[in-house]
Image (cartoon, coloured by chain):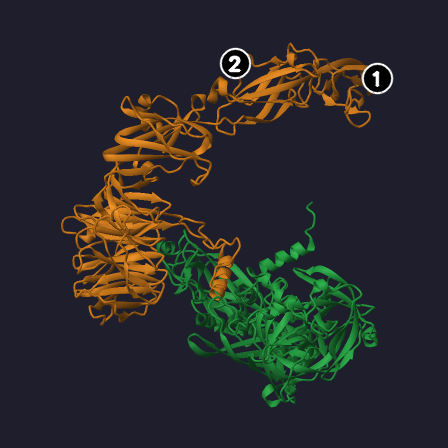
Chain colours: A green, B orange
Amino acid sequence: MPSPEPRNVRRFARRGAAGFALLGALALRPAAAARPDIMPVEDVRPGMKGHAVTVFSGTGTDRFEIEVIDVIRDYLPRQDAILFRSSDPRMVHSGIVGGMSGSPIFIDGKLVGALAYGYRFNKDPIGGITPISNMFAVGDLPFRPDVLPHNKVRGIARAGAAGWADAMLGLDTTPLPQRRRPDDLTPQGGLAPIGAPMSVSGLGAEATRFLADTLGLVPARGGSGGTAVGDAKSAPAKTWQGGDSVSVVLIRGDNAVAPNGTVTWVGGKQGEKLLAFGHEMLGAGPSNLPIADARVHVIIPSVERSVKLSSALHVRGSMIQDRQAAISLRTDVSAPMIPVTTELRAPEPDMPPRVYHSEVALGVDLTPALAASLLVDALGEGAADGTEVVAEIVHQIDVTTSKGPRTVTVKHEEFFPAGVDARALGRGRGALIMAALLNNDFEVAKLRGVRQTATLRYDSPVEILESVRLADADVHAGDLVTLELRLRDYRGAVRTETLALRVPDDAAEQDIQIEVTGGDNARPPRPMPDSLDDLIDTLQDTYPARSLVATIYREAEGLSTRHGLLPELPASVLESLAHTGSTTSAVRFKQMARRVIPRPALIEGEHTLKLSVKPKRKFAAPDPD
Amino acid sequence: MTVRSRMSFRTYVPLAALLALAPASAGAGGTRSFHLGDFDDFDAGEAEGAAIEGSGKVTVGLLPARGEVKGAASVFSCVADPKDKGAAYLGTADRSGVQRIKLTTPSKAGAAEPAASKLAELPGAVVSAMTTLPGGDLLAATLPGGTIHRIDAKGKVSEFAKLQVEQIWALVPHEGRLYVGTGPKGELFSLDLNGKDPKVVLDSDEKDILAVLPVGKDVVVGTSPGAKVLQVGPASDGVLVHDFAGDEVRALALVDGGLVAAVNDFTDRGLSSVQALTKNLNRTSLVGQPAEGSLDATSGGGGAQSSADLFFVALGAKRDLARASEATWESWLHKDKQYFTGLLAGAKGSEVLVSASQQGKVYRVRGRRDVATVADLDERQATALCRLGDGAVLAATGDGAGAYRLAAAPAQKARYRTKVLDAKQPSTFGAVYLRGKGVTLRARSGPSEEPDKRWSEWKPVTLKKEGDALAGALALPTRRFVELEVTLADGGELRDVQLFYAPENLAPLVAGVDVARPEFELGDDDEPEGKLTIKWKAEARDDDDLVYEVRVRPEGTGDKEWISLSGAEPVTKKEYKWDLDSVPDGVYEAQIIASDEPSNGIARAARDEVVSAPFVVDHRRPAIDGVKVSGLSITGTASDEGGQIHDVAFSVDGGPFRAASPSDGLFDTGREGFQLTLPEPLAPGRHRVVLRARDAFGNIGSHAVIADK
């Protein structure tokens, strides 16, 4: 086994690599090490004493003393951590506090780094510091306005378009990050990022939980905000300084969601560059999310993890980088937010419709999740009934594609036997379509606004398709065959209805497959999309939820191409166009003849019959009626 | 191609026709051979500048001139440019478009191929049919939809006509009208040459009108899926000319003396893939990419499950279509595992060119026995044929877009490469005999069906005249697959190839030996024939003929004690009956030795041997003693030294034997008590009772007693 390299050799090697690779850029910055107001991690020794700056209450900063315990080399890849202990009585009482992430720590008047790590269930106020040199490396990274923030993929969801497509088709993978409880967020023991407590106001427990599950941030309900989160234009000028409380604004308006932490360092000619947190927030890398100054109401001590209860005040810039060692903020850049209107028409006739006006931050995974959380909240507030409810959700999404502005309208209806499962609806078609608009193989749609309406009714309009029976003994080509459908109302009577289907004239001596199902369970055949607008057309093209779809599948095949659907092709043409020697272009599918019959209720169930078709009758078949 | 046993080439050739009927079998010393001798044998390989003639001869042919087609996956249709003799319009697939190309002579080696230029982009996935108007403008129909586009020489596109159909398959001007074959309602339209006045002149029961061919004042059409030829004209509205067994009449052509139809027959696809393909369709409609994973989205599993036939019917000098419905349609060409895509009447006589789906082949057919491969294009499919203004033929290709002017110039030399020949086992390749002239040969061998970097380099083979053949010897690595390449000089020809090889000999496998005692029934009164039956299971694994030697020895003795039962004459059946008359009692073992010597010769023969479980040879008869008679009850003991007692029976006064019962309930040891009571009614008085004990080997011992009643 080779002996470890001497420490100084390794560090020299790091510096040499810094100019050549991105990882190098994230390593120590020589300039930082040389600055007189900075103490490099190499100079930190156990027993050194210093202080941290943070906001305990209100907006003014305060300090508490610390003592260095030790330096942990390579705690993270190319990143050391400095362990400290605080003897401040407030810290002894509360331990390391969520929201203190980023609090600058000074030794001998020199900035060492940011308070960033702690232990869950700690008995002593022992924390970890991210060296400022690593944070500077993040601060050196540019603002990329063309990049839409994209969270790290979590859970088992597949990345990109495959993820939402899987969900839309009901395949066995989840579209959105796997649900995670905050308790699960730090499965490992030991030193871990404190995290940014997500200050939540104007949202109920269910929506809060939904957001926590989706974003992986620990929620702290109780902060105010909402409409109080104003714009910088309407606020007095703010001069940022290390130790200030800072929030990233994800939602504002009638609801507010803003993860909170502390500013570590302020730089730039105008004080427009800020570094904060000392660790990542969502780990999105290049970002563009609004930031606001914040007021701390109180520190809520907790055995597990104390948190600051805070409210965002005024949007004052943008988070432009979200990386392992820090988040990088700019006060001279503004981040877009899109308006989301959520309307709830409750099942109780006496409850007036409620309308919520909010703005949400823009991000590939973020925007669908944030808009969905607002819907979840509305449903949670207005439909907390544990009885049979049918929910009709309509999404109108204003987008601009390369072909111009358009509004995507999708309607979805679902029955809940024991009250609305708001979180299930939150992960429903509207969120998936937003995900598709932002994350597809063609272009990123510009979202201009979302209107989402949930209409709930006490009703159980569901028919369960129990069986399908072919009434005729023999099936001949060209026959109008009668299917007997055994339908049962939800908690109701069973009845039999008939459905007539025409067997194709040219199906003689072939097998056919008849499939009967509900409109929600089938998709109109559509060609491969060649543009985002094609994709939007496909996303909008659905069968009514209250319909019965009867399909006859044939042995013969058609082709789906980027330039149209070729549903019926002679065999030799099909073979010529569906190349065996390439993976491009055409995709085969079974020819189908389909009947869509409107129904008064939603259909549950799917039944399939396979039949052998006899030659056409020489004499007309008897009328099925 | 046939694989056959060895004999001398001179002997073999006259007997070729006879031997071709013989099944492949192992020859002497394990030597086998590949033989290529007829059109189908040679047509399975690839040719470059070579013509494969129907008589089973490869000759130096004509080199096609290739033109490059960019920006499309396939060319699906073509039509000559009426204003430029060497030029044609190409209708593309994957993205509908029309390109124009001019092809004259082959480009010089190393020079860039002439490229097609884009004339127009059209909506849709494929240009399914094209024709030109008298003024020179081009008409192109696209899928999906029923739009016919008009394109002028500058590429300006306008709508010529829009029919209420999903597909247009044929555009044919005739008698001042434009005939349009469509789907999926099987309608034939007629329009004026301005795209106006559309009329349905045929509303057939079929789905698609794929081919439209003017014959005199009438037109005949080819349909799908009924594979019918229908006649349409002033006096005939869809008269059935012929109904083929198959799925489609893809193309029709009129030649001197008759009508030719290209008929394809596809195997039904079944419904097992409905769910997977529907899921795939839905997925691709959302993400634009087929599903990942192992889903077989082709459902056909690669390669069409089809066969194709070219049929001819004589129409007589007056081209009387009525004869076509009465006369016999004779098959001029049949091909399995492919389908035909286009037909073009030859410049003279009854010659017709056929484009095929496999290996980019174009066949020239002049009659039932006159078939030749005139082009073997680089792309996988030949999709369409059209005649240029200067009389040359242009072939378009799919699955790799390209266009070829056929027979552009005589080839100075030609190459013919056999298909990869499979010896089934790693083999030593030996002598090769060619019949022909002006040929050179090289060969390579490898371990895979598709040549790759594991294959050997091409190795030249020196050929010497030997009798009427050219003989050479291959020196290739021992591999399972081999490929030969013959280069033909100007005037050269290749008529016959025979390659000898010896597969590595796989040892036979003897799976097990069973030794069956002499068989007898419970009711048998006599001892069975004294023979043991030794049976075994064995397989050659490489089709070799096997022989066996059967040996026995007393159990526990050494190898020197084996005694061969079969002697000098080997056993060929998997069974041997061993006569035990002279064999002493004891426990023995049998050994089976299998050898593939008949197929491989004594030096190369491989053996396998298996020894049986020990078995008993027992001649000794059981004894009956201790017999006590008490009234009508008799008890006693039967014992056998060689094995267990099988049964005890008795006979009263010479009557039939009846079974006695074992005292302990079962006969399972070599010493068994038995008991019996003489059955009633029994006359009073003295009776002679014969007791009989039989052991498991069938040996019988008896004892007589007197019983009084």
In this view of the protein, which residue sits in the foreground, B142 or B193? B142
Which of the two discs, 2 and 1, labels the residue nearer the N terminus?
Answer: 2
**Residue kind at label 1, given as amino acid type:** Val
In this view of the protein, which residue sits in the foreground, A468 or A34? A34
Front of the two marks 2 and 1: 2
Q: Residues within 10 Å of mark 2 (few under 14, many from 20)?
A: few
Residue of label 1: B629
- Left or right position of B156 against B357: left
On the question of residue B224 being in view, the answer is: no
Check the image and name the residue furthest to the top. B582
**Residue kind at label 2, given as amino acid type:** Glu
Q: SS for tag 2? A: loop
| Residue at screen point 63% across, 16% down | B552
Residue B227 on image: x %, y % = 32, 53
Which of the chains bears the disc numbered 1? B
Where residue B701 sits, quadrant-wise, is top right
Mark pair 2, 1: CA separation: 56 Å
Residue B399 on image: x %, y % = 36, 53
Residue of label 2: B569
On the question of residue A383 being in view, the answer is: yes
Work out whether B42 lies above or below B581.
below
Check the image and name the residue furthest to the left. B317
Work out whether B660 lies above or below A521.
above
Work out whether B131 lies above or below B602.
below
Residue A12 on image: x %, y % = 63, 57
Which of the chains bears the disc numbered 2? B
In this view of the protein, which residue sits in the foreground, A217 or B23? A217
Residue B507 on image: x %, y % = 54, 26
